Image (cartoon, coloured by chain):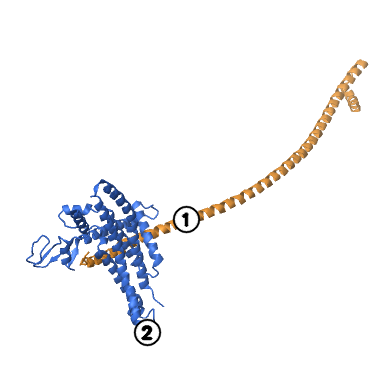
Chain colours: A blue, B orange
Amino acid sequence: MSAEAHTSTEYIKHHLQNLTFGQLPPGYQRGDGETLSVGTWTLAHTAREAKDMGFMAVNVDTMGFSILLGALFLFFFHRASVLATKSAANVVPGGWVNFVEWVVEFVDSSVKGSFTARNPMVAPLALTIFIWIFLMNAMDLLPIDWLPRLAGLAGLPFMKVVVSTDPNATFGMSLTVFALVLYYSVKMKGLGGFVGELTLQPFGKWGVPANLLLEGVNLIAKPVSLALRLFGNMYAGEMIFILIAIMFSGGSVMMLTGGVLQWAWAVFHILIITLQAFIFMTLTIVYLDMAHQEHH
Amino acid sequence: MNINMTLIGQSITFAMFVWFCMKFVWPPIMTALEARKKFIADGLAAGDRGKHELELAAKRAKVTLHEGKIKAAEIIAQAEKRGTQLVEEAKGMAKIEGDRMVLVAKAEIEQETHRAREALRGEVASLVVAGAAKLLRREINAQVHAELLEAIKNEL
């Protein structure tokens, strides 16, 4: 019984570990007992190794899948844009072009609805966020063992398929959005205007410390909430998929129940992945709109 | 779950994707959408215009039809009038012609009568001469009696 619990724990931990590439320092004792004589760039074989690699390491699976999905998105959307431009206006668009145009119009109407200033960057940004996050979340719907098992056969120790369950990915995006918010705040309001916005309200010039505290928290909460909301939702969803997958080893009744549960959770997750992508996109638009707006 | 360089890599990747999307995906799709929107709007406007024109044409056709009917009625009335007139004229002409023919016939009859009378007169004169010759039983000098015969002839 304890052995089984152990393997379950290992199974879960294995599924939550990224494939990390980084440097291990000299004198480091690896997971298999080997002691390194010199600093070595290698793939982490255990979670402890990945942790000990510190900041100068890369999650190969996160980068790989996100770049692959982003490239797929851009390739197919670009192809649709070429097709749409090439065909005359009186030609009814085919299936794929039609779908892309529908998505673009949906994003465009979202931007027009919430973004009042003029900035040609916001709509493409929103489209990229929506589709990219959707695709990264959608990796969740693949049976969780397929790609890790395949990677295992190829000799890779870990493989985390759902990019948005890696906080590096969600924070990477939200911090980029945050940088844009800061850039446009300063650009539209001037440095003085932006600092004034942070310090002179809501309590006026005699309450500068309180103002700064409130507005600072308000400002910092934007990227943190963006990243953590997406990460939390996807991480929790993935966790439930893992727990359901553990049921498959518990006999035929558990297996049947697990199959039904997995199907139901996957159906529900179709809603979650779309919703989370949409929320990230909408909040980005709203934050950028606030950055563009002058307070009077 | 460790924060590492992936964070920066993801940020750079994200920025590059957004740049690519802004440069090569979004503008052409929006251009195509605008073009199609304009095409459809133009088509709808043309349809509206066509419908309007159809209504106008129907109205015009109605007016023209009405005018045509009135004109046709006028023409029929005129034709009837003219017909009546023609009949009247024909009647008048026929009467005149008839009168003329009656006159001609009368003149012919008179002429014929006159001719018959002349012929009869000649016959009677020769009969009278023959009768007289028989009565007198003698040769009569035609030259002498010619005056006499002429006188008789004129008396008849």
Location of the C terminus of chain A by quadrant is bottom left
Q: Amino acid at mark 1?
A: Leu
Q: Nearer the viewer, residue A154 or A109?
A: A154
Q: Quick one: which residue is furthest to the bottom in this view?
A: A206
Q: Nearer the viewer, residue A185 or B33?
A: A185
Q: Residue at x 40, y 76 (%)?
A: A295
Q: From what the image shows, is residue A222 above or below residue A66?
A: below
Q: Amino acid at mark 2?
A: Trp
- Tell whether A105 sits left or right of A1: right
**Mark 1 Cα-neighbour bin, 10 Å: few <14, some 14–19, many ≥20:** few
Q: Quick one: which residue is furthest to the left in this view?
A: A37
Quarter location, residue A24: bottom left
**Mark 2 Cα-neighbour bin, 10 Å: few <14, some 14–19, many ≥20:** few
Q: From what the image shows, is residue A93 above or below residue A42?
A: above
Describe the element under mark 2 as helix, strand or loop.
helix
Describe the element under mark 1 as helix, strand or loop.
helix
Q: Nearer the viewer, residue B143 or A89?
A: A89
Marks 1/2 in contact by CB < 8 Å: the verdict is no
Residue where numbered disc 1 is placed? B44
Quarter location, residue A64: bottom left
Q: Quick one: which residue is furthest to the right in this view?
A: B136
Q: Residue at x 38, y 73 (%)?
A: A293
Q: How many marks?
A: 2
Residue where numbered disc 2 is placed? A206
- Residue B41 visible in the picture: yes
- Residue A75 visible in the picture: no
Q: Quick one: which residue is furthest to the front in this view?
A: A1
Q: Return the x and y of residue B150 as percentages of the image width and height.
A: 88, 26
Q: Return the x and y of residue A261 as percentages of the image width and height.
A: 31, 51
Q: Return the x and y of residue B80 as percentages of the image width and height.
A: 71, 42
- Tell whether A220 sits left or right of A3: right
Q: Return the x and y of residue B70 as percentages of the image width and height.
A: 66, 48
